[in-house]
Amino acid sequence: MPKPKRKSKASANREAKQSKPAKKGLLERLAEGPVIGDGSFLLVLERRGYVKAGYWTPEAVVEHPEAVAQLHREYARAGADVSQSFTFYASEDKLKFRGNEAAKKYGVNKINEAACSIAKGVADEYGTLLTASLSPTPSYLEGKGKDVVQAEFKVQTEIFKKYDVDFFLVEFFPHLEETLWAIEVCKEYGKPVVASMRIGPDGDRGGNSPGKCAVEMAKAGADVVGQNCHFDYTTSLQTIELMKAELEKEGLSPYLMMQPPGYHVPEANKGGMSALSEYPFAFEPRLLTRWEAQDFARKAFDVGVRYLGGCCGMEPYHIRGIAEELSTERGGRLGEASENHGMWGASLSTGSFLSTMTHRVGKDYWMKPPATGRPFSASYSAFFEGKPKAP
Amino acid sequence: MPKPKRKSKASANREAKQSKPAKKGLLERLAEGPVIGDGSFLLVLERRGYVKAGYWTPEAVVEHPEAVAQLHREYARAGADVSQSFTFYASEDKLKFRGNEAAKKYGVNKINEAACSIAKGVADEYGTLLTASLSPTPSYLEGKGKDVVQAEFKVQTEIFKKYDVDFFLVEFFPHLEETLWAIEVCKEYGKPVVASMRIGPDGDRGGNSPGKCAVEMAKAGADVVGQNCHFDYTTSLQTIELMKAELEKEGLSPYLMMQPPGYHVPEANKGGMSALSEYPFAFEPRLLTRWEAQDFARKAFDVGVRYLGGCCGMEPYHIRGIAEELSTERGGRLGEASENHGMWGASLSTGSFLSTMTHRVGKDYWMKPPATGRPFSASYSAFFEGKPKAP
Amino acid sequence: MPKPKRKSKASANREAKQSKPAKKGLLERLAEGPVIGDGSFLLVLERRGYVKAGYWTPEAVVEHPEAVAQLHREYARAGADVSQSFTFYASEDKLKFRGNEAAKKYGVNKINEAACSIAKGVADEYGTLLTASLSPTPSYLEGKGKDVVQAEFKVQTEIFKKYDVDFFLVEFFPHLEETLWAIEVCKEYGKPVVASMRIGPDGDRGGNSPGKCAVEMAKAGADVVGQNCHFDYTTSLQTIELMKAELEKEGLSPYLMMQPPGYHVPEANKGGMSALSEYPFAFEPRLLTRWEAQDFARKAFDVGVRYLGGCCGMEPYHIRGIAEELSTERGGRLGEASENHGMWGASLSTGSFLSTMTHRVGKDYWMKPPATGRPFSASYSAFFEGKPKAP
Amino acid sequence: MPKPKRKSKASANREAKQSKPAKKGLLERLAEGPVIGDGSFLLVLERRGYVKAGYWTPEAVVEHPEAVAQLHREYARAGADVSQSFTFYASEDKLKFRGNEAAKKYGVNKINEAACSIAKGVADEYGTLLTASLSPTPSYLEGKGKDVVQAEFKVQTEIFKKYDVDFFLVEFFPHLEETLWAIEVCKEYGKPVVASMRIGPDGDRGGNSPGKCAVEMAKAGADVVGQNCHFDYTTSLQTIELMKAELEKEGLSPYLMMQPPGYHVPEANKGGMSALSEYPFAFEPRLLTRWEAQDFARKAFDVGVRYLGGCCGMEPYHIRGIAEELSTERGGRLGEASENHGMWGASLSTGSFLSTMTHRVGKDYWMKPPATGRPFSASYSAFFEGKPKAP
């Protein structure tokens, strides 16, 4: 198999930078300006053929490490500051939940080790921050209690520690309580902790408002708090504003984060985007364009968000868009992949056969709502969890 | 970097098959049933960060061979029979056209060699057919004549021959004349020749009808003739029917092929999809779902198409869809990636946290037009080459 | 000009009823079940060519009384219980506001008299309740104070009294204060008073919540309180629920009313539907179908609304839909126009040339969202008061 | 019931004109410039509550003459040159077809007499041309032959003659043969004959192309030939171009006419708009705006159409739009109803409470595709005669 070779100017610069002995940590980078997370692994690798929808577990890290590594590289090249090990849903109870054979076949250790190892390889090469995430456990839902749940978490975090992650990530939790348990486990390692919940403006499943969730996460020691997945960025900007207001009221000032999905799901109600009937196999028309990813980045930055990445469905070109939008705020930094793009699609100005396309450059040109090409499709899904929503 | 490991049952079967000394050739496979081509390189690798929109040339094969190889593997795993070297727009005149520095930086030989070498590696591993394509040249447009154009082609075909491609591919031509020149060059090597044009029902730019184009390509010796890119599959099915009718009238019976783009562009007129104002950076809402790719496969097969693949924007999950739709016609064969999917999304039936999603399986469930999530978007683009189209 | 003749069974029944000396009053009818108001005059007569958009004043009652009478008859035939004199915006200050010559040309008295006279003619013929409405005054906006504003109102209400309206109507007010002044004037006549404001869930322009507005209107003596115009029924159902909750908290129980516009304007923000850029001359695609009017009727009834009619854009076929939906709750009563329709479009079952159309009857058939036929149109207006709304 | 009074300047002018002894005939007017037909009776009166969908017969002329007269007046005021008696589907066989009791209840004579009488009253008042139409008969479909069918026609035309129509109209025919039989009957009266068929670009049900139909109608003596109903104006403009080309080839030059429906039905196939599943009770979102009616008028005029009116669903404000668009070509003439509108909505410039709306005037402002307000609706109907159309 061919080996990656990187000869571009940007990569030369990067190598030069890498010669500096120490890379900056998360909090240091956040103090300087916005930090860019990476994008989706589950849904992107499902489309590439490596993840099984249903269980949504990450055994691809063992089965097809080259595919996972490739995606990590794409995010790093797009401009991400972070390489997040693909440890989502990799707690042991989840790996064996409802007939899932991943635990038996590979084991929780091997999966978490492989995920960290792959991400570390890319982080070392590109100078990105290494992290790994904890996610909701079946044990919590089954009411097994704090000790059992935290024991599941610790199996993972011990491996994260072994690979010396730069910070710990806690994400996609729908219950504040389990989130706080996860934060507590992570705090033991003396590294920064980043925590986000998959809640909307209505709050978590236990009836806690977004503001309450943010305050509790911050009080539990999370250095960065926020929202990820399930609602689109427009909806989640409201959630973040509710979090921010309550944090300010309490005199707390953690950094704010958003990692929305790469989809438009404006009609999603409390159940989030997975309750829409087209999820997960007919969501293509909802995919953000790169320009809409830029729109997210600008609006989130303006609201005060400083850790911006993507969740389900957010692809490398979206992360590149976020990086391009915030390049000024990041000292002009761009990912290598921007060499093939240019701000607002400047690469088109060179023309090719189609000289008529050279004017398709610029913010004004690209920020109009794109046509869908789908006259047989409605804008909104009529079905929510099986029940038609009124016209 | 981690090396691919394949331990699945499907791959074990494949290895068993590979031990057979000779793989079947294109015409042999076509005689048995439908053959599945692979998908898009240019637009998919643009989104992954490796191709520059504008020139649209394939220097990524030299700069980032691992990214190109990974995409080849994804198509092979999806169920493609063919690994098509990424030699599109790699004639020397195109590599230096309008300020493009690819020719100077890497040279036409190195690029075509790298492309063939990467594809050959994957073809050897997966037992797919190796091919490489010729595409339109600037020299033709500049009126330099047959000798000059064919000389451009021969530089490429000599390399294709060196890598022992299983067949030659001629594609994306808007002029019948240049197509025939390309076929003529390919025919010299004594291998099967596959030829497709990027024309719609109105025919080529020289005023030749689809039927005329098909007949001439067949008379020139193409074993497979058809249409690729520029118009969506609904429109191109009409083109194919026009081709078929004229071929039958002339008593010709080459195999028919279709490699449509992965987008819905029903409103495209003669200029094809690149004339729509959202091209190429805001086409996401137009992306086919996997089910629409299945719909294409079924309809194309029913019309008589036997070589079915994808062009710009057609991704691995689309190719998997085509392979799943035609698995019965292909003796039950499926790509490895179908292990993570199952027919009509059967993997969802296992459930996960969301037991409410287990019913989301089956043709009836998925064949409804998906919502777009885009209430600010129209279905059709109002602007064609700068001129608004009437409501 | 031909004279109306009515020989149908329904009209015979009606005549029989008319022989009873006294028709039931508003409160008596409300005690028995839902009361149906009539629909739009301004926008419907604008489309018929009799009202001038801009001033939106009702001088058509003088200029073309036959057109106004005809529309009254259509509402009565559709099943309305109420004939509302076309006195909207007929205060003297409005009739001469910003260059409007209606006051000078015809005078406030003549216009209000003509409006009442026409409506009375139809009410007498069809047994409907006669009413007439007060609407917002320029004097209020110009800060002229309670005395001036109430003087404007009294000119109108004295005429309403002269025509012996069955009840007084106060509507379309965006300010609670002016609403209360209008109610106060109407209460002097010892007849029932119905009051509705054109507010959304965010409340009135003075910062009063819908609940506060409802409570104050009820305390001021309005027998029926609610919402009309400006927001579509889906949005206004929320407004009504907010009103209801607060009324219950205060131990108040006026009847609730809704007279929404005949349009879908889900994206309207605080400015209401007139802030959408397509208002008022490109609102056709937003027109409710008759089935959507039925949907409104059912949902409003279920929430507890007992006075249901329509405002701008609500046409006779919408009122017929409301009457058909609630016919069971109204003792089986239907308007005469239902003879030409039947429940859920039953008239189609007779067939005509197109026997294929006879199955197009029934709730299941008609309650699906209708296609728009408009591939160049978006669902939502991108422009609100000149400022584009984000995608 | 109040009597119409007309005191406007326009009506004064009209009265002045009326004092001239002879009004100009159809051919005379066509020689001077475009002639404007009137709009829809069936579907408009269905929505107003006077026509029964299913049979679609015009007994409203007997039952509610005031409603029919009012609609005639609205078209005349909008700027129509023609008052077309409501005799559609009023052949005797149709009035008793499939259980229809109209023939028995009122009789063919009474219905046709009433229709002509009402229209004549308005034509006399407004100086419009009086006409009446023949439409397809069940007898033709039942194969009863020329004599029977023409006998049905003659019952009607004898009444038309009695009311001294200015010209005869033959419309909505799907078969060329029956059209020619109708023209033959009309020609006997020595008046101009206008003939249009409800065909699309694919031609009539007997396999005759639009060109063939036009040529045959002209050869049969029709002074004006064209297309009406069933397909939207965009589609029918193609039909007209096909007609025109063939007429020119044959050296024939009748005037061309178009009376399209007031709906967007771009996805209608051979079955026309009534085959769309939303027909006839959920077609509101498809209604043309007044601006789209202007667009029709301009494009039709540019193609050479000189008789422009509307069929099903075309309302008074559409006819006003057509008249406003062509006012220059008609010597500055406008209907009375334009006093309440002004070119491109100029009446809004006066403002009202909403001074922010005064800029909503002008072609540039109004010619953008309007939003639909319907996020749950698709652009195209997925069902055609019960069979889903592919995405």
Image: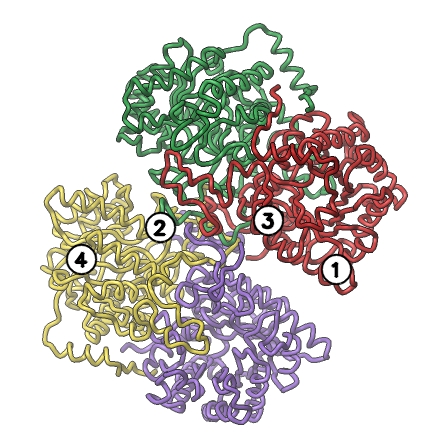
Chain colours: A yellow, B purple, C green, D red
Q: Report the front residue among A287 and C272.
A: C272
Q: Residues within 10 Å of mark 2 (few under 14, many from 20)?
A: few
Numbered disc 3: secondary structure: loop
Q: Residues within 10 Å of mark 4 (few under 14, many from 20)?
A: some
Q: In the rendered structure, the residue with mark 2 lies on which chain?
A: C
* Residue C185, quarter of the rendered image: top left
For the residues carrying marks 4 and 3, which lies nearer the camera in this image?
Answer: 3
Residue D326: mark in rendering: 3
Q: Report the front residue among D38 and C122.
A: D38
Label 2 and label 4: CA atoms lie apart by 49 Å
Residues indicated by labels 3 and 1 sit on the same polypeptide chain = yes
Label 1–label 2 contact, CB within 8 A: no
Numbered disc 4: secondary structure: helix
Residue B156 location (% of width, % of height): 46, 90
Residue B122 location (% of width, % of height): 41, 81
Numbered disc 2: secondary structure: strand
Query: Which residue in the structure is indicated by mark 2?
Result: C388
Q: In the rendered structure, the residue with mark 4 lies on which chain?
A: A
Q: Does residue D264 sit above or below B3 in this rendering?
A: above
For the residues carrying marks 3 and 1, which lies nearer the camera in this image?
Answer: 3
Query: Which residue in the structure is indicated by mark 4?
Result: A154
Q: Residues within 10 Å of mark 1 (few under 14, many from 20)?
A: many
Residues indicated by labels 2 and 4 sit on the same polypeptide chain = no
Q: Amino acid at mark 1?
A: Gly
Label 4–label 3 contact, CB within 8 A: no
Query: Which residue in the structure is indicated by mark 1?
Result: D211
